[in-house]
């Protein structure tokens, strides 16, 4: 028998932790005289900057005032956050009707509800959930934001989106509670879980048809007031443009990258020319071309509003940059993976979808998220062509008569908003790398 004696470690924990911290500080910050001097200088600079920002932005700041003149009367040296607070709705929603803001908030809530199953560990079929988010959610959210009469195509797509959202939610609840999927649970409830495969498939198709019929009947009585795109603005407009650009960038980039690597000369040349054309000009040029030249190539009577033109331009631009990221990821996969896929009898699409592309995407995560963050920030360029995104609204604060000349506070507030959003995206990227073991040490 081996007896293991344990001794209390509480008395040794504090000295060990303190020793570790002191050792880390000495090794990284005070290892030499030069490092110690540089550390003290940097600490002094940080102290001065933080102290100045605290005094200007918090201690001497004005939070309640009716105009900028009153801010000066209260504190001439502090920040005037009262103007930002009064403009907060415009900064986030633009000129969207205040009585209809619930539609924007509901659209954001539906997006969170739609994508929540992707982060739940016991939920199955996450690829289908992600694809449905990309291809169906924009129709439901688009009508919710814009309103008006629905065409037959729009009615069908809204019905599909509503049924898919309800199915995804039920699927997620069942997955978390029991680990099973929605189809298996429905078949079990109906006593068809032991039936032949053809019977199970037909049963599920009948249930789907019934759900679509109910959804179509519900959406026919759903009509919202029209909100013209010219009233969209603020952070809401920025997220709409960048969100659609992000959602289309990866699929479009994959198609263009595969086209550039194709063995068919026509497809390869066209894909290469398309990618190089958009990558050779800045985004602002693409936006100007989309809003001025694009309508000239359309048939007579075919009119697209400026917002749709901008979204198309941003989507194509981001897809071309993403294509090069995807191509680099594909080139990082060893040739043996391609040969192994051919050996087990997989065709081209099976090889790419099951073997090559999943490995390539793991290596591309940092670059993909970096492109998404860059796209989010680049969408502020739409303010130059007359769209009032968040940057346009931040600039408008200083043009409002009561707050004329208020520049620093709105722009600083916008910088904080972008910093928070981009930091969340970056942190999630790192989490995804670790989860997929793409960034782990070998």
Image: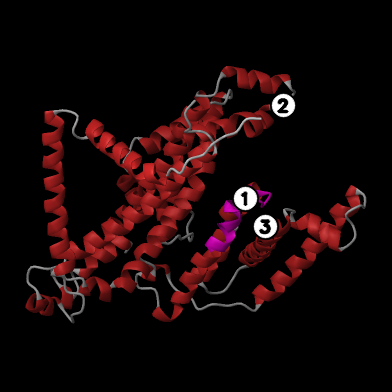
In which quadrant will I find the N terminus?
top right
Decide which of 46, 135 is in the foreground and name it: 46
- Look at 17% across and 61% down and name the residue there: 54
Label of residue 176 in the image: 3
Among numbered discs 3 and 1, the one appearing first in the sequence: 1
Among numbered discs 2 and 1, the one appearing first in the sequence: 1
Image position, residue 181 (x, y; %): 74, 54
Numbered disc 3: secondary structure: helix
Q: Of the residues tagged 2 and 1, which is closer to the observer?
A: 1
Main SS category, magenta section: helix
Magenta range is 111-126
User: Would residue 92 be seen by someone viewing this image from the given angle?
Assistant: yes
Disc 2 designates what residue? 346
Image position, residue 381 (x, y; %): 30, 53
- The local crowd at label 2, few if under 14, some if 14 to 19, many if 20 or more residues have their Cα within 10 Å, is some
Q: Quadrant of residue 350?
A: top right
User: Would residue 297 be seen by someone viewing this image from the given angle?
Assistant: no
From mark 2 to mark 3, how far is it between C-alphas?
34 Å
83 is within the stretch colored magenta: no
Image position, residue 270 (x, y; %): 50, 31
Disc 1 designates what residue? 121
Image position, residue 391 (x, y; %): 28, 60
Image height check: is 134 above or below 104?
A: above
Q: Is residue 210 left or right of residue 135?
A: right
Image height check: is 431 above or below 220?
A: above
Numbered disc 2: secondary structure: loop
Q: Of the residues tagged 2 and 3, which is closer to the observer?
A: 3
């Amino acid at each position: 028998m081996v007896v293991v004696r344990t001794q209390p470690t509480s008395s040794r924990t504090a000295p060990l932790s303190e020793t570790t911290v002191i050792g880390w500080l000495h090794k990284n910050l005070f290892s030499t005289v030069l490092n110690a001097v540089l550390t003290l200088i940097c600490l002094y600079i940080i102290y001065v900057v933080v102290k100045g920002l605290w005094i200007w932005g918090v201690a001497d700041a004005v939070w309640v005032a009716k105009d900028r003149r009153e801010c000066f009367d209260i504190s001439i040296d502090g920040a005037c956050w009262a103007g930002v607070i009064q403009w907060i709705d415009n900064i986030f929603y633009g000129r969207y009707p205040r009585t209809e803001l619930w539609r924007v908030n509901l659209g954001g809530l539906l997006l969170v509800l739609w994508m929540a199953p992707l982060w739940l560990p016991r939920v199955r079929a996450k690829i289908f959930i992600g694809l449905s988010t990309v291809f169906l959610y924009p129709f439901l959210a688009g009508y919710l934001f814009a309103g008006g009469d629905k065409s037959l195509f729009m009615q069908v797509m809204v019905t599909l989106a509503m049924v898919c959202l309800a199915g995804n939610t039920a699927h997620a609840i069942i997955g978390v509670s029991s680990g099973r999927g929605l189809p298996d649970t429905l078949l079990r409830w109906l006593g068809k879980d032991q039936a032949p495969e053809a019977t199970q498939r037909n049963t599920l198709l009948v249930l789907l048809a019934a759900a679509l019929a109910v959804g179509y009947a519900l959406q026919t009585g759903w009509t919202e007031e029209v909100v013209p795109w010219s009233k969209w603005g603020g952070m809401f407009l920025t997220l709409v443009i960048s969100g659609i650009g992000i959602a289309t960038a990866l699929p479009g980039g994959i198609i263009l990258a595969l086209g550039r690597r194709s063995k068919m000369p026509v497809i390869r040349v066209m894909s290469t020319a398309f990618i190089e054309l958009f990558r050779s000009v800045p985004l602002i040029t693409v936006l100007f071309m989309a809003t001025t030249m694009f309508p000239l190539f359309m048939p007579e009577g075919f009119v697209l509003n400026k917002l749709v033109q901008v979204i198309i331009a941003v989507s194509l631009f981001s897809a071309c940059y993403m294509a090069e990221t995807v191509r680099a990821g594909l080139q990082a996969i060893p040739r043996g993976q391609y040969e192994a896929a051919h050996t087990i009898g997989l065709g081209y699409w099976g090889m790419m979808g099951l073997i090559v592309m999943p490995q390539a995407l793991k290596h591309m995560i940092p670059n993909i998220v970096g492109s998404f963050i860059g796209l989010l920030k680049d969408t502020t360029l739409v303010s130059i062509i007359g769209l009032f995104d968040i940057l346009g609204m931040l600039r408008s604060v200083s043009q409002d008569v009561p707050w004329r000349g208020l520049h620093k506070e709105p722009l600083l507030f916008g910088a904080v908003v972008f910093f928070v959003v981009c930091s969340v995206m970056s942190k999630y990227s790192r989490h995804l790398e670790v989860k997929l073991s793409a960034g782990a040490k070998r």
